[in-house]
Image: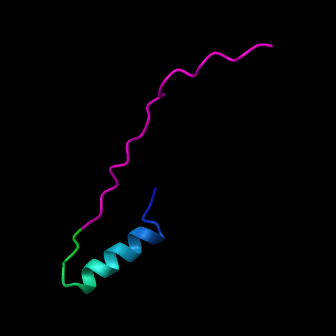
Amino acid sequence: KGPGSGRETAIRSLQAAGLEILGVKDVTPQAHNGVRPRKRRRV
């Protein structure tokens, strides 16, 4: 997951406001296998 269009715009607007951006870190939680799915409904 790289920097998307929304992130680029946000970084540019912050830099235009006078802030110095040193780096951007993605802290999106990644599921390691996740939760067990529900049983399939049989009819």
Q: Residue at x 22, y 84 (%)?
A: 17
User: Which region of the structure is painted magenta?
Assistant: 23-43
Q: Residue at x 19, y 77 (%)?
A: 20
Compared to residue 4, the image places residue 30 above or below, namely above
Q: Residue furthest front?
A: 43
Is 28 part of what is drawn in magenta?
A: yes
Q: Is residue 9 left or right of residue 40?
A: left
Q: Residue furthest right?
A: 43
Q: Position of residue 14 (x, y in %)?
A: 26, 78
Q: Residue at x 18, y 79 (%)?
A: 19
Q: Position of residue 5 (x, y in %)?
A: 47, 71
Q: Nearer the viewer, residue 18 or 3?
A: 18
Q: Is residue 26 left or right of residue 14?
A: right
Task: Tell me which corner region of the image, top left, top right, bottom left or bottom right, holds residue 2.
Answer: bottom left
Compared to residue 9, the image places residue 43 above or below, namely above
Compared to residue 23, the image places residue 15 above or below, namely below
Q: Is residue 26 left or right of residue 40?
A: left
- The colour scheme used here is rainbow
Q: Position of residue 30 (x, y in %)?
A: 42, 40
Magenta: predominant secondary structure element?
loop
Q: Position of residue 41 (x, y in %)?
A: 71, 16
